[in-house]
């Protein structure tokens, strides 16, 4: 009987020790969502021509005012442009450059470029440490067809970069959370 009591007490102590040692007192790192007020896409034509700048500024963030969207001009037909993105938080002074955070956490971010028709195609020109696309650098190639389109640029946080089609720019299976999405009306002349 004494052996049974000792065994029971030892078992109870072992369970208590196991339960208390499994508690995780480590604080969970919180990754706060970035405030992005301004996104600027600069597209430099290969071989010369006019640089095209697309910009969206929403200085009140999620406030009541709509973003101001500007497009500097039309794209040329049958031309490749080297594109780059700059994202800012202009609610701070001086403005915070969000690119630095995206570059530091490039495996957790990916831009997606969607066109409403076939007047151009977009390909990635940069990659994270695992060889998956990021999109801060990209190429836009116009077709031989004249016309207009909407270019939607979306930044996803923690997308599934290994899902079907995501590495080639399809947002369909990407998942994650949208940090910013902007629609630019563009044309090819």
Image (tube, rainbow, N blue to C red):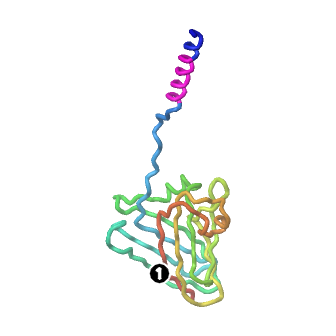
SS state under label 1: loop
Residue 32 or residue 79, whichever sits in front? 32
**x and y, in percent, of residue 82 in the image:** 60, 72
Residue depicted at 60% across the width and 69% down the height: 172
Which part of the image, by quadrant, shows the C terminus? bottom right
Prevailing SS of the magenta stretch: helix
**x and y, in percent, of residue 53 in the image:** 49, 76
Residue 146 or residue 178, whichever sits in front? 178
Residue 71 or residue 163, whichever sits in front? 163
Extreme residue in the front direction? 1
- Residue position marked by numbered label 1 in the rendering: 72
Residue depicted at 52% across the width and 85% down the height: 74
**x and y, in percent, of residue 183 in the image:** 48, 76
Q: Is residue 28 left or right of residue 4?
A: left
Residue depicted at 34% across the width and 61% down the height: 91
**x and y, in percent, of residue 110 in the image:** 57, 62
Residue depicted at 47% across the width and 63% down the height: 179
Magenta region = 8-21
Q: Magenta stretch containing residue 11, yes or no?
A: yes
The answer to whether 136 is drawn above or below residue 75 in the figure is above
* Res 81 quadrant in image: bottom right
């Amino acid at each position: 009987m004494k052996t049974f009591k000792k065994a029971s007490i030892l078992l109870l102590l072992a369970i208590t020790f196991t339960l208390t040692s499994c508690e995780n007192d480590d604080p969970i790192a919180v990754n706060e969502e970035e405030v992005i007020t301004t996104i600027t896409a600069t597209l430099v034509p290969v071989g010369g021509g006019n640089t095209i700048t697309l910009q969206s500024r929403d200085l009140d963030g999620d406030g009541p005012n709509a973003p101001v969207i500007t497009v500097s001009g039309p794209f040329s037909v049958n031309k490749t442009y080297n594109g780059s993105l700059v994202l800012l938080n202009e609610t701070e002074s001086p403005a915070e450059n969000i690119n630095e955070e995206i570059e530091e956490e490039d495996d957790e971010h990916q831009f997606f470029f969607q066109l409403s028709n076939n007047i151009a195609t977009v390909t990635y020109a940069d990659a994270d440490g695992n060889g998956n696309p990021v999109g801060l650098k990209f190429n836009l190639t116009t077709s031989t067809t004249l016309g207009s389109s909407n270019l939607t640029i979306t930044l996803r946080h923690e997308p599934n970069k290994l899902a079907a089609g995501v590495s080639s720019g399809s947002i369909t299976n990407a998942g994650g959370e949208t940090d910013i999405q902007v629609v630019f009306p563009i044309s090819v002349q």
